Image (cartoon, rainbow, N blue to C red):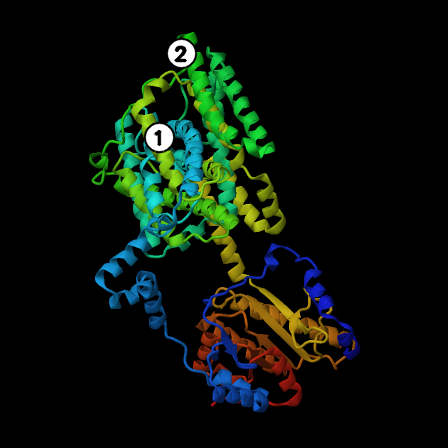
Amino acid sequence: MASSAAACSDDEKANWVLNAPRLSGPWRESVEFSGEESQKDIVMLHGSPKHFKQSTTTDASSEEHMLDLEKNSSSVDRSQWVLNGPEPPGLWHELMDSVRETISYCGSKYSSLKSQPMLKSVVSVQREIFPILVWGRNYSISKFKHDLMAGLTIASLCIPQSIGYATLAKLDPQYGLYTSVVPPLIYAIMGTSREIAIGPVAVVSLLLPSMLQKLQDPGADPIAYTKLVLTATFFTGIFQASFGIFRLGFLVDFLSHAAIIGFVAGAAIIIGLQQLKGLLGITHFPNSTDVISVMEAVWSSFHHPWNPHNFMLGCSFLCFILISRFVGRKNRKLFWLPAMAPLLSVILSTLIVYLTRADKHGIKIVKHIKEGLNPSSVHLLQLNSPYIGDVAKVGLIVALVALTEAIAVGKSFSSIKGYHINGNKEMMSMGFMNIVGSLTSCYVATGSFSRTAVNFSAGCETPVSNIVMAITVIISLQFLTRLLYFTPIAILASIILSALPGLINVNEIYNIWKVDKLDFLASIGAFFGVLFASVEIGLLVAVAISFTKIILISIRPGTETLGKLPGTDMFCDTEQYPMAVTVPGIMIVRVKSALFCFANANFVRERIVRWITANKAKGLKGNNTKDAIQIVILDMSNLINIDTSGIATLDDLQRNLLSEGIELAIANPRWQVIHKLKLSNFVGKIGGRVFVTVAEAVAATFSGKIATTC
């Protein structure tokens, strides 16, 4: 073994990690937990547990003391470091710290304000809330030129898309334009992303009517339905702002990446099917969003007279938009062409219909769009409605979905430019813009991936591009709405259809399948839930599958036997590292879970007993008693906490092992774990066999040196 150890270079050892065999399936996943916050640089005492930390700013005497400890401390002394460590914080102390950190997280930032003059303190607070006061100081004409070009470019895409998304949300067209005015202006002042383009998006525009039309039919009473949409938008803003203020962004994590990929793909198909109403000129269309109901409506429409001119006109301009997008991707100098194509389609199709009077020959048109700036909608909020509870639930769901999309979009493009967006500030800015939006006739706005990509390609420098876009939409609302009277509905449908391919990420779904089969199941569950049930059912299925995955991993954690890597003091999984050598007479077991509790303790105990029984049977069969297990070492480095059921199971395991003449030792227990084991007197029951590392436990086994509790 010594010769093989000497022959192993660092590169060869690295290849042990890279060339390890594949896992046998998703159930053998290792669950990694990292609960320690990044702090200032620390120096760890050699072999000491993690909670014994010393600052790097030590003086000469403390350095000499450290060197003395390293020279004179034995494995028994280091075991005493574990056993005699200070008590960890109690449950109440941890809860209060968590609440204090959650509610008063700004306190650390504003603690220095007390010593500052009042005016300077006010300015500092304003800069924290309104980032425009920070980056606006260095704003220049050259940046404005880029932002002006980017703002005009995304405005050309935003205007037709906003009208189309409003019809998808079953609202009058002007509400889409309203939503592209106020929210972008608020975000430009409060947001931290430079590239994100704010406005209505397809998924949210589908999500709102799919849930609210169960409370109020938009066809029967459009005004009452509009009131519910504005009220839901108000609650969406309240929830989003609360997530940011109280640092509850972890709620967004309930929608995993895989679930969102499947949900968005399913929603894209549903949105596409919904556009068949405008593309085919279908008069009667179901309120249900599932694919079966939509296809039944489409099939039944073929048995009635229908005008093919809508279909021909819509498909012609859909091809034009897709071709322009292809040309823009091939030639980066023509990046503006895909963004201008929807607006050009609206202008050309409107002229064609106006000049040929095609509306009198079956072409369905938008007709009247109310002109003027956003009117106040405070009086339209239904806070005393009998549906207030249901509307609040809709607001919560939409808040989570909208935040997930916006933060994902913002992080994607900020990482490209090498800066970081503040998640809590993003939530607050999204929340306040939707609160103000609900008071000014806007429905839910969030970050649009398609418009953000165009904004990025157009060379935007700051959120001023959102301001330019909003001003352009204001001009359109004031002077150009009459020109949109003859815009064909089929063109709006084609514009929405052209944006859908980017929502279906087949490559990412395939990568999820390769990496994690359970995540793929969550993605597919969300996809088919949206497709064959409803949007909210799809979300529920995705969240349920994600939670099921967590529960299954918790109650059936991975356990592994460890062996020593040649030439090192490291002990690793013998299945992952086939070159790892097991120590004769010693079984080293590591539990791949953060908790050892009622849900998984018996499972782990039974597996250890099964391994010991198998080893004993193997020894009897081969008449080899030399390798019979004499001691079991539990590596507790992964365990963050343990409950009374886990301790009782360890007691039971200890008795079983003693009956077989086998001793039990534990290595590298975390702070809470060793504290509870001491309180329960389990450490005394195992004879004080507690070690800082597995290597020291193995060495102590052969030398016979065991620590005792004090």
Work out how far the residue at label 1 is from the one at label 2, CA to CA, in angstroms.
23 Å
Nearer the observer, 62 or 566:
62
Q: State the residue position of label 2.
A: 354
Q: Nearer the viewer, mark 1 or mark 2?
A: 1
Q: Residue furthest front?
A: 141
Which numbered disc flags the more N-terminal residue, 1 or 2? 2
Q: Quarter of the image containing the N terminus? A: bottom right
Residue 301: x percent and y percent? Answer: 47, 17
Q: Amino acid at mark 1?
A: Val
Q: Say which quarter of the image contains residue 660.
A: bottom right
Is residue 58 shown above or below 574? below
Q: Residue at left 25%, top 57%? A: 122
Nearer the observer, 423 or 243:
423
Q: Residue at left 67%, top 87%? A: 702
Is residue 65 shown above or below 385? below
Residue 557: x percent and y percent? Answer: 56, 63
Q: Say which quarter of the image contains residue 209.
A: top left
